[in-house]
Image (cartoon, helix red, strand yellow):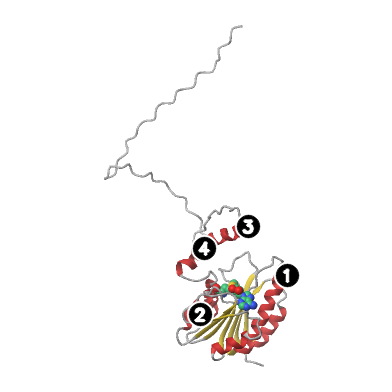
Amino acid sequence: MERRKSSSRPPKQAKPAKKTKIAKTALGHEPEKRTRKKSAPMKGEAGQRELNVHVKTAKRREYGSTLWLKRQLNDPYVRKAKAEGWRSRAAFKLLELDEKFGLLKPGARIVDLGCAPGGWCQVAVKTVGKRGRVVGVDYLFVPAVPGVEILEMDFLDADAPGKLKEMLGGAADVVLSDMAAPTTGHRSTDHLRIVALAEVALDFAEDALSPGGAFVCKVFAGGAEGELLARLKTNFELVKHAKPKASRSDSAEKYVVAIGFKGAS
Ligand SMILES: C[S@@+](CC[C@H](N)C(=O)[O-])C[C@H]1O[C@@H](n2cnc3c(N)ncnc32)[C@H](O)[C@@H]1O
């Protein structure tokens, strides 16, 4: 049987592309193709562009660590802190709280509880200057911060408050606490732990502050700080909550700022 010829036409041969003359550069090279780069969206935080550094999961690296590393590498505050010479992104939280509440003054005595790696110490010493005094405590080693005296000790150790007061050499103007215990992942346990640390920090502040002094403390949103707030409202003129922009929006962390200590009762 005769095969029917296909009615479809043979495909058209593509015409060879016209060779366009490309002007050469002064050095005789062809110029690089100019393409329009798509601009990345601004995140707003820290006025930095949002990064998207991809992190491969290494064989021996746990998934959680990979996520942490990815978050660090893509965090505009981490980059900004590195560029500006701050020890931690947390430095921006204190800078913002100070700007809002006018906490740090030249010549002031400041105590920084839970100070590693030293970002808040750097911010504090920069403002109080040589006439002031900054002392910090952490159970982690903190590389020296010029102008700051650091106690490597657990603040919950019975001797720690006395040592800090001795190092300060007088009543404190501001007690800062950014203390946070390592998280367990169990929300209410983590919350109770942070409230317990805040209460011990407030015990210290009530003992060490001079009248008119201020107390700044990290707390977690989600209740159970009622007692702490009641104490603060009794002993300070003004009590406010603040969530600095540098505090991650997906974190329950916030700060309680108490100003105008009424004096030891
Ligand atoms: C979020 S970090 C502080 C960051 C610091 N503000 C900065 O700017 O670099 C919390 C610190 O609290 C410390 N910390 C938690 N519990 C403590 C305790 N009982 N005594 C001393 N330090 C403590 C931790 O070791 C950790 O370094």
Per the image, label 1 sits on a secondary structure element best described as: helix
Per the image, label 3 sits on a secondary structure element best described as: loop
Query: Does the residue tagged 1 have its C-beta within 8 Å of any atom of ligand 1?
Result: no
Whether residue 192 sits left or right of residue 93 in the image: it is: right
Whether residue 97 sits left or right of residue 19 in the image: it is: right
Image quadrant containing the C terminus: bottom right
Q: Amino acid at mark 2?
A: Ala
Q: Residue at x 73, y 70 (%)?
A: 188
- Lower sequence index among marks 1 and 3: 3
Q: Quadrant of residue 183?
A: bottom right
Residue ID for mark 1:
188
- Lower sequence index among marks 4 and 3: 3
* Mark 4 or 3: the one toward you: 3
- Lower sequence index among marks 4 and 1: 4
Q: Residue at x 72, y 81 (%)?
A: 227
Q: Residue 212: x and y, percent?
A: 58, 89
Residue ID for mark 2:
124
Q: Which mark is residue 240?
A: none
- Above or below residue 103? Residue 223 is above
**Is residue 241 in view?**
no
Depth check: 257 or 136 in front?
Answer: 136
Q: Residue at x 29, y 44 (%)?
A: 25
Residue ID for mark 4:
76
Q: Residue 131: x and y, percent?
A: 46, 87
Residue at the farthest left position: 26
Q: Amino acid at mark 1?
A: Ser
Per the image, label 4 sits on a secondary structure element best described as: helix
Depth check: 123 or 48 in front?
Answer: 123
